[in-house]
Image (tube, rainbow, N blue to C red):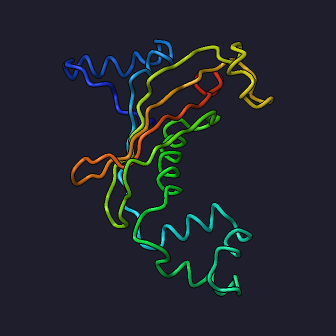
Amino acid sequence: GTLFEPRPTAASDGAKHQHQHQHHQQPYSDWLMGRSASIRRRFGAGDNAQGLLVCGGSELARHASFDPNYRRAQDWIRHHAVGPAIVSPVLIGGLVGALVEAALPNSVPLHSSTSQIQPLIIGVEVRAEIEITAVEANVAKNSAIHKDVPNREKSDGYQIQMMTKVQRLQDGAMIANGTHSVWIPYTTTMK
């Protein structure tokens, strides 16, 4: 299956059904253009601390901890809210990254940029969304992109560029927005 929602059309149900079966016959790049995927999420009190522990690892957490006994501090942090009531940008970026990975599995990340517009309060539900804005085929032959693709992945494929946004669900206020680009080899898309 796919997380991508079909592009909005005024077609009848019969035409929609026919379009779903035709996407395998049309070029993958045409099928992807304009598609979007989204997910809703509410971060809890312990999520900031857990995210920072996971991203920073024990060495960074040990130096950031208020308790010199890291093992004791680690257990306490995992079960209590630590820090302000604001969601860390690490979690917002992670939510977008997880959505991209779920929507485009086996993709190779090339670039990600997120601007935080305003803080997100812990416990407030958000909606993260990605929308495909450009698809470039045969990108392994394009030297500007080719240099960013790991050696083992230098075969023909697609570079996919997306617009990303995270909005507060209750009023639609923009929390963060940005761009994300990935590369997908043809072998992944030709299933």
Residue 152 coordinates in the image, percent (x, y):
79, 30
On screen, residue 97 above or below 123: above
Residue 57 coordinates in the image, percent (x, y):
69, 66
The part of the image, by quadrant, that contains residue 181 is: top right
Q: Residue at x 71, y 87 (%)?
A: 69
Residue 168 coordinates in the image, percent (x, y):
30, 52
Query: 58 and 98: which one is in front?
Result: 58
On screen, residue 82 above or below 89: below
Q: Residue at x 71, y 28 (%)?
A: 148
On screen, residue 76 above or below 43: below
The part of the image, by quadrant, that contains residue 145 is: top right
In the image: residue 171, left or right of residue 122: left
Q: Residue at x 24, y 20 (%)?
A: 9
Q: How many marks?
A: 0
Q: Residue at x 74, y 70 (%)?
A: 59
Q: Quadrant of the C terminus?
A: top right
In the image: residue 86, left or right of residue 62: left
In the image: residue 66, left or right of residue 95: right
Q: Quadrant of the N terminus?
A: top left
Residue 8 coordinates in the image, percent (x, y):
26, 25
Query: 12 and 39: which one is in front?
Result: 39
On screen, residue 135 above or below 184: above
Query: 7 and 143: which one is in front?
Result: 143
